[in-house]
Amino acid sequence: MDGLDAGIIRELSGPGGSYQWNVRHPYSRIAHNLGVDDETIRRRVRHAERTGLIHGSELIVNPHLIGLEPARIVLDVADPEQRKRMVLSQIRLIDGVLLMLDMHGGGLQVLLFCEDAAMSRRTELISSIAGCRDPLILRNWQALGFRRCDLTLTRTDLMILKSLRKDPRKSTRQVAAETGVSARTVERRIALLTESYAFFHMFRLNFQKLDGVACSLVISYGDEKKKPGLDQRIGSSLERTIYSATNAKTTSLFNFVCSNVAEAEGIREWVRGLDGVAETRMGIIKEYILESEWLDDELQSMLSNA
């Protein structure tokens, strides 16, 4: 994966520390942002799909739209050689778990959508299953890259969401045929849902297909005032960043690709030595596990009650 491939995934996953809130983000705009032509973007995306790096694209509903709050949990699984498989199988069954980033060794990140009143209990349960006594739990939705959405969904909206869930770039004509409403209505409602931040885009990625290694680096800063400058310095030094979240006051996340583990460890040591950095947690991503099927059940339940 070169810098252009990484840039395309970053543009489609969420540039600028947020998610990609336009699930039909035009390739022409991506091409403009990356300084290439439209056909180059299409060709690179098709290649990533053929090689298996990208093996799916999904619309994810804004958690606020279904009465939930987001949290990211960074964990170290105790005794990973013996327990990691069991830990993953148990955590994936917990209500609201959307994504797990399984690292080689003990590292694990979990993205969770949960009712605010139950969040503490849910994060404690996940930490307990992992056997982790000092998890890093990030709960500020703005810092995590989410947007507030107070839109009231209509029955038509729910049908459109169901239609687009596993194919966000599905044609308007096909969505109209599946929902039984006019193409003009579909276009108008998708535009309103997009403007209201009702959903965002996520890939299904297979990092085993990479020519190199994918890394996730979580940085805790001891000096809040130095953080913006350090984020800028670190981000500009990582040529193959595929996702970053830097809006939190004292914590930042960078997911990036390296040629090998030695290069990744060198980057971590460099970051760790920067004045203002208090702690770093880095893992080599083994598996990207998107557990989104429960959203289909949620949408169906809302549609039944609409």
Image (cartoon, helix red, strand yellow):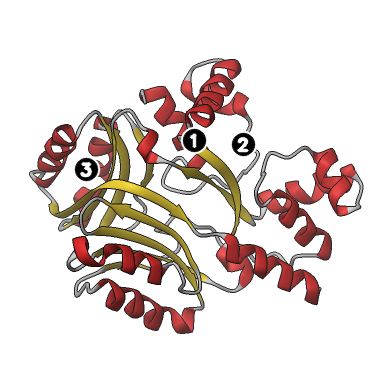
**Disc nearest the viewer among 3 and 2:** 2
Please state if 289 lies on the left or on the right of 238 as rendered. right
Q: Residues within 10 Å of mark 1 (few under 14, many from 20)?
A: many
Q: How many marks?
A: 3
Image quarter where the N terminus lies is top left
Q: Secondary structure at mark 1?
A: helix
Q: Which amino acid type is marked by label 3?
A: Leu
Q: Which is nearer the eye, 226 or 74?
A: 74
Looking at the image, residue 28 lies above or below residue 185: above
Q: Residues within 10 Å of mark 2 (few under 14, many from 20)?
A: some
Q: Secondary structure at mark 2?
A: loop
Q: Which amino acid type is marked by label 1?
A: Glu
Which residue is depicted at the point 17% across and 66% down? 79
Please state if 286 lies on the left or on the right of 11 as rendered. left
Spatial CA span between label 3 and label 2: 29 Å
Q: Which amino acid type is marked by label 2?
A: His
Looking at the image, residue 86 lies above or below residue 122: above
Spatial CA span between label 1 and label 2: 9 Å
Image quarter where the C terminus lies is bottom right
Which residue is depicted at the point 63% across and 66% down? 65
Spatial CA span between label 1 and label 3: 22 Å
Residue 195 at x, y percent in the picture: 67, 50
Which residue is depicted at the point 80% across and 65% down? 154
**Disc nearest the viewer among 1 and 3:** 1
Q: Secondary structure at mark 3?
A: helix
The reply to whether the C-beta atoms of the residues labelled 3 and 2 are less than 8 Å apart is no
Residue position marked by numbered label 3 in the rendering? 230
Q: Residues within 10 Å of mark 3 (few under 14, many from 20)?
A: some
Which residue is depicted at the point 46% across and 49% down? 18
Residue position marked by numbered label 1 in the rendering? 11
Please state if 26 lies on the left or on the right of 7 as rendered. right
Q: Quadrant of residue 89?
A: bottom left
